[in-house]
Amino acid sequence: MLKKLLAAACLGLMLSVPVLAQAGPDALVKRISSEVIDTAKTDPAIQAGNIDKVIALVDAKVMPSVNFEVMTRSAVGPQWRQASADQRGKLQAEFKTLLVRVYSGALTQIKDQTVEITKTQPVPQSTQVVVQSEVRGKGEPIKLDYRLDQYDGAWKIIDVNVGGIWLVTSYRSQFATELGKGGIDGLIGALVERNKAAASGKS
């Protein structure tokens, strides 16, 4: 279920209708969309499901606009403070690999959907904003919220809400189980195995 929600979130991020550049976090969503959608729709290999090309596109165009340190720290929770620099690096790398592969699955679904950004609003008592949008195509529209914050003057995505579920919060619940069983190293090992299984087509 989580994989489907994350794929839907990525699809919404990538399918926004291109418009003239403008300042603000909503412009980030639109810029990524205009760069990715043209490639995804016209590249035969991507349409055929070539996972290596799909991952390369997502890694190059989408992931630079995600703050993985913040996302990983939030997903790991309080035990992040106990992790060494080496452990934190491994957690971020494995979490990124996980997200890139899940996000990549959405690209092959791009056909004729569009996204309407419906609202951008500040998060009270913080520097964050939430960009609200809807994926529109056949069937009921999918409502998506993107939480962003500024780092060194640039907007970065730090969470996505699909159908009322914040994905980082959902991963935090999964990670808590692994942390309870084996601590930080146990979580790293679980992520490594999960990514290996995904790469071999077992999940």
Image: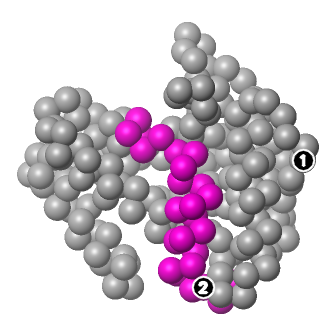
Q: Is residue 202 above or below residue 153?
A: below
Q: Is residue 59 above or below residue 42?
A: above
User: What is the magenta range?
Assistant: 47-71
Task: Name the quarter where the C terminus is drawn.
Answer: bottom left
Mark sitting earlier along the chain (2/1): 1
In this rendering, would 60 be left or right of 135?
Answer: left
**Magenta region, mostly helix, strand or loop?**
helix
Amino acid type, residue under disc 2 in the picture: Gly
In this rendering, would 3 be left or right of 26?
Answer: left
Please identify the residue farthest to the left as the structure is shown: 182
> Dot 1: what SS?
loop
The residue lying at 34 percent from left, 85 percent from top is 200
In this rendering, would 63 be left or right of 20?
Answer: left
Could you say where residue 136 lies in the image, as x and y percent from the top left?
A: 83, 58
Amino acid type, residue under disc 1 in the picture: Val
For mark 1, what is the residue? Answer: 19
Residue 75 lies in the magenta-colored region? no
Could you say where residue 20 lies in the image, as x and y percent from the top left?
A: 90, 43
Name the foreground residue: 180 vs 183: 183
For mark 2, what is the residue? Answer: 49
Q: Dot 1 surroundings within 10 Å: few (below 14), some, or many (20 or more)?
A: few
Q: Is residue 94 above or below residue 57?
A: above
Could you say where residue 53 lies in the image, as x and y percent from the top left?
A: 57, 79
The residue lying at 53 percent from left, 26 percent from top is 152
Q: Dot 2 surroundings within 10 Å: few (below 14), some, or many (20 or more)?
A: some
Please identify the residue farthest to the right as the structure is shown: 20
The residue lying at 79 percent from left, 30 percent from top is 23
Could you say where residue 78 lies in the image, as x and y percent from the top left?
A: 23, 30
